[in-house]
Image (cartoon, grey):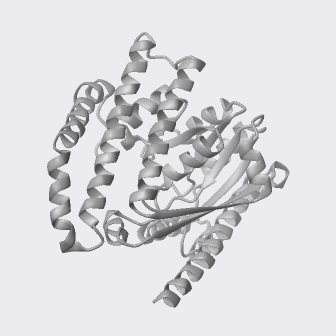
Amino acid sequence: MMPVPPKLLRRLVIAPLVIAVEALLILVSPALGLVAVVTSPLFGGWRPLRMTLLVLAFATRHLAATLACLGLWVAGGFRRRVPSETMQRAYYAVMRWFVAGIYRTVVKLARVEVSFSESDAAERILSSPGRPVIVLSRHAGEGDTLLVIHELLCRHGRGPRVVMHEALRLDPLIDVLGDRLPNRFVDPRGGDTEVDIAEMAGELGETAALVIFPEGGNFSAERRLRGIERLDRAGHTEEAGWARQMNHLSAPRPGGALAAIDAAPTAEVVVMGHVGFPTGLGEVWALLPEPQAIEVRLWHEPRNAIPADRDERIDWLFGWWRTLDAWVEDRERIRASRTEQRS
């Protein structure tokens, strides 16, 4: 993967280019809509029209949110440092508007039903300000990051802080929000990711929620095998055996998660699992005609249940990932059974 261009190039070249493309899409949207209507009967389920409306809705919201961030930067006096608390609330308002709008559009146009199952403790912890939260989430499928942020920001009023791959800076909206809000971009190929995450966790306020995906990327069969091979090469035989037993999740990388827990001793820990996300754009296209269901499960892990010893904490994290894998296995089996009954 090529290195991300420097900030000046991203701001002066990439951002204007993305804005121009989105503005062009909006300008020609009537023609795109007409073509989608004409071609939809050829594909069934109004796929071209649904996909076109999704793309146009995203482009419109993305453009508006990017320009809003530009306006806030100007209103803030063109400052490069972390904005004041008032300006941070304004940037979070832009994020909330963007995330909530895209979420509603996807749910409506793709006919997605999202159901939540939360333990009483998880619901209470997330909805009650006073202590920060660390969210350890499964990472699998197109759009699961959007759902995690929507859950925290829109349903529970938490200010999400996300650990993101450096490559996401190529999106000007993510790039700006990542810099203007207390997020971190990390490059797994270099740098001290654990130090960055620890600094981020140490700054958590009472209403903040730090989001970490311990798998490091969306689940795939290839990533699962690479994780097993990595553990074998490092001599972690027991962990490799646990990873082989998991069919739906990759082996977690414990460094970032444990660094966050160490650096934020007052933070509560919530574990998040989900099923139902498409694995790629091809599957999104294939599934558009049919109603879809996404299931989300949240658990709260009390601080006194987290071991103090590092090796024991690694076992603890793998234990949770095995629990998540078993839950996903159970939900997938039930979903497959329901599909067979309908057919």
Q: Position of residue 172 (x, y in %)?
A: 34, 34
Q: Is residue 207 left or right of residue 58?
A: right
**Pick the front one: 110 or 294:** 110
Residue 235 sits above or below residue 74 on the image: below
Q: Where does the image place residue 225, in percent across and percent down from the top left? A: 47, 71
Q: Quadrant of the C terminus?
A: bottom left
Q: Is residue 108 above or below residue 90?
A: below
Question: Camera-side residue: 100 or 234?
Answer: 100
Q: Residue at x 55, y 47 (%)?
A: 150
Q: Is residue 215 left or right of residue 239?
A: left
Residue 285: x and y in percent read 31, 67
Give residue 24's quadrant in the image.
top left
Residue at 14% across, 50% down: 31
Residue extending farthest to the right is 304
Horizontal side of residue 313 vs 232, given as left or right: right
The residue positioned 56% from the left and 16% from the top of the image is 84
Which residue is most to the top?
77
Q: Position of residue 244 (x, y in %)?
A: 57, 76
Residue at 22% across, 36% down: 23
Q: Quadrant of residue 88?
A: top right
Q: Is residue 160 above or below residue 234?
A: above
Asked if residue 213 lies left or right of residue 286, the reply is right
Vertical comparison of 173 with 35: above or below: above
Q: How many marks?
A: 0
Name the one closer to the observer, 133 or 24: 24
Q: Nearer the viewer, residue 212 or 116?
A: 116
